[in-house]
Amino acid sequence: YGDSLLEDDDFEPLREALISAWVDAGASAFDLVRAQLGKSEDDLPYDTDRPAVKRMFDKLGDRVKGIEATTRDRLQTMIERGVNDGLSMGDLAKLIEADESGAFNAARAMMVARTETGTAYNLLSLAGYKEGGVEKVEIFDGDGCGWDEHDDTDLADGSIRTLEDAEDHPLAHPNCVRGWTPYLEGLGAPGDE
């Protein structure tokens, strides 16, 4: 995953924070997916080396706009590497803010932390759904939030989407609250009466 992009020790705390957040988000997403699908950890393991999971990790960091490509590459590399110990959202935001690029004030750092963690959780849950045989998801999102962007007239909340469509739109905008649950043809979402 491009280790040569981060040879400078100054980036280590930021790299570890983002990696930890994404790895933890993936583990939590897979726990939920297993519970939703009635699968065991043996049936549906969370492993960052699995092709479906790797493919989602390749998308990490792409949503951060208005920064130099090298800074974005650092964020993506940090996310992809993975570490075992997690940080709070606030600690993650502080480390992003401390990046030497100067691209992140406190508010923007928190927005990046929230947005990237939400993207990770959504993308990695899709990897679990795909491996679990799910083809569609039911979307939960803010009232009036659009599918492609917040003001899109194609509303997200309550819609049924393919995994591919959901992968293309893990969030509509920074700080988006989008989430999903598996939709099984003929059965609807888990818990539907």
Image: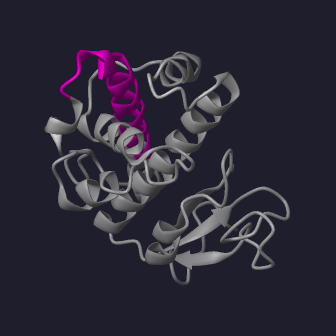
- Residue occupying the point 40% across, 38% down: 71
**Left or right, 140 with reference to 129:** right
> As rendered, which of 136 and 9 lies closer to the eye?
9
Residue 30 percent location from the top left of the image: 37, 47
- Residue occupying the point 18% across, 54% down: 50
Quadrant in the picture for the N terminus = top left
What sort of colour scheme is used for the picture?
Answer: one colour
Which residue is situated farthest in the right direction here?
A: 144
**Left or right, 38 with reference to 183:** left
158 to 88, vertically: above or below: below
162 to 28, vertically: above or below: below
- Residue occupying the point 44% across, 76% down: 164
Q: Which residues are magenta?
A: 7-29
> As rendered, which of 149 and 49 lies closer to the eye?
149
- Is 80 magenta? The answer is no
Residue 144 percent location from the top left of the image: 85, 65
**Left or right, 187 with reference to 156:** left
- Residue occupying the point 61% across, 69% down: 138
18 to 185, vertically: above or below: above
> As rendered, which of 60 and 143 lies closer to the eye?
60
Residue 68 percent location from the top left of the image: 45, 44
Main secondary structure type of the part rendered in magenta: helix
- Is 13 magenta? The answer is yes
Residue 80 percent location from the top left of the image: 28, 41
